[in-house]
Amino acid sequence: MTSGDPPDPLPAEGNRPGRVALRGGDRGSVTVEAALVLCGVLAFLALGVEVVMLVIGQLRCTDAAREAARLVARGDSARASTAVAAMAPAGAELVVRQDGDTASVEVGARRWLIDLRARAYAVLEPGVADEGSPAVADAK
């Protein structure tokens, strides 16, 4: 080969020296990798959506407990159960405890394997504490 001769063309893809040709080649490997990545992304998104739903459920329990405590403090325990049934996640339970002139309200619900619980406290209005302790209610 002289300095004026054009260089030799590159050998064919499978015929390069030092390279072993695979049977069937790499055809379809990108498709498999893309499918695996897509499954991973979908699983991650599903987990993210579930976490957001758990946070929303906890906020709903908190709002329901606050509203129930306010209603119990006013002496309207019957409406507290109705409010919890409307505001809290499905199957939520309401527990009301009255101790002297204060009321403690707990709202709990279960989503998957996680317990969502919220508590609220309120000072009873004058005259409400004399009526007696409200019964434990269940808002299912």
Image (spheres, rainbow, N blue to C red):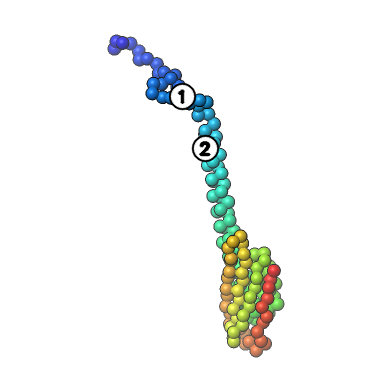
The residue located at (60%, 74%) in the rendering is 106
Is label 1 or label 2 in front?
1
The residue located at (40%, 16%) in the rendering is 9
Picture coordinates of residue 71 (x, y %)?
65, 77
Residue 53 sits in quarter: bottom right
Type of the residue with mark 1? Ala
Residue 94 visible in the current orientation: yes
Q: Nearer the viewer, residue 54 or 125?
A: 54
State which quarter of the image contains the N terminus. Answer: top left
Q: Are marks 1 and 2 in contact (CB under 8 Å)?
A: no
Query: What residue did someone put label 1 on?
Result: 21
Query: What residue did someone put label 2 on?
Result: 33
The label number, if any, that marks residue 99 in the structure image: none
Query: Crowding at label 1, few (<14), some or many (≥20) Cα neighbours within 10 Å?
Result: few
Picture coordinates of residue 70 (x, y %)?
62, 77
Residue 87 visible in the current orientation: no
State which quarter of the image contains the C terminus. Answer: bottom right
Q: Is residue 33 above or below residue 55?
A: above
